[in-house]
Amino acid sequence: ACLCELGRHDDALVLEQENYEGYVAMHGVAHETTVLCGLNMIISRVMVGRFRIARELLREHLPVAVRALGNDNDLTLKLQKNRAFCLLLDPANSRDDVKNAREIMQDVLQRRRRVFGPAHPETQVAADIIAEVRVKLATMRG
């Protein structure tokens, strides 16, 4: 976080990759902390607009999280949220991509309500993202 605050995003991304690789060596890819490190790498790439790389990482990390932690785990749901962010925020994406982001977030919201309850902060975040997606879809042609 400190390197990002200094505008040194590339340095931060390298350190996150090294951190992830260290956890893989110590615990394997399916360990909860390793999944968290993978999530952090994805979030950082989404934040700096490197959506293609973030999507590639999601294709690698999301199936591992589902197998190891389950569909309803908080980290798995955060990976899904970032999958939706890639579809929602990438300016190169189409209206269909934004619709796909809405479907992903509707599933995330349903799971969060069931598992964590409607008052959980991440449940409200999911609801807010769906509202943003609806606004974006309304402003897009097609």
Image (tube, helix red, strand yellow):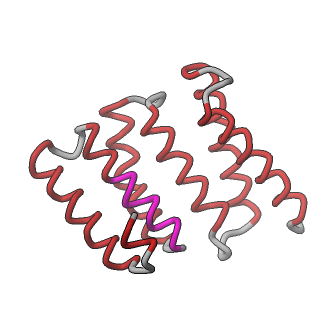
Q: Quadrant of residue 60?
A: bottom left
- Image coordinates of residue 73 in percent, x first then y, are 44, 30
Magenta stretch, main secondary structure, is helix
- The residue positioned 37% from the left and 72% from the top of the image is 3
Which one is nearer the viewer's eye here, 15 or 73?
Answer: 15
- Work out which residue is located at the far left of the displayed protein and give it: 26
| 122 sits left or right of 41 in the view | right
Seen in the picture, residue 81 relative to 42 is either above or below; the reply is above
Residue 24 coordinates in the image, percent (x, y): 16, 51
Q: Is residue 76 above or below residue 16?
A: above
Quadrant including the C terminus: bottom right
From the top left corner, tell me how far across and down residue 107 is, in percent: 63, 35
Q: Is residue 121 within the magenta segment?
A: no
Where is residue 125, by image quadrant?
A: top right
**Left or right: 101 in relation to 133:** left
Residue 80 vs residue 8: left or right?
right
Residue visible at 40% across and 29% down in the picture: 70
Residue found 24% across the figure and 40% down from its top = 30
The range drawn in magenta is 38-48
Q: Residue 76, how many percent across, how many down?
A: 44, 39
**Residue 102 in the image: above or below residue 3:** above
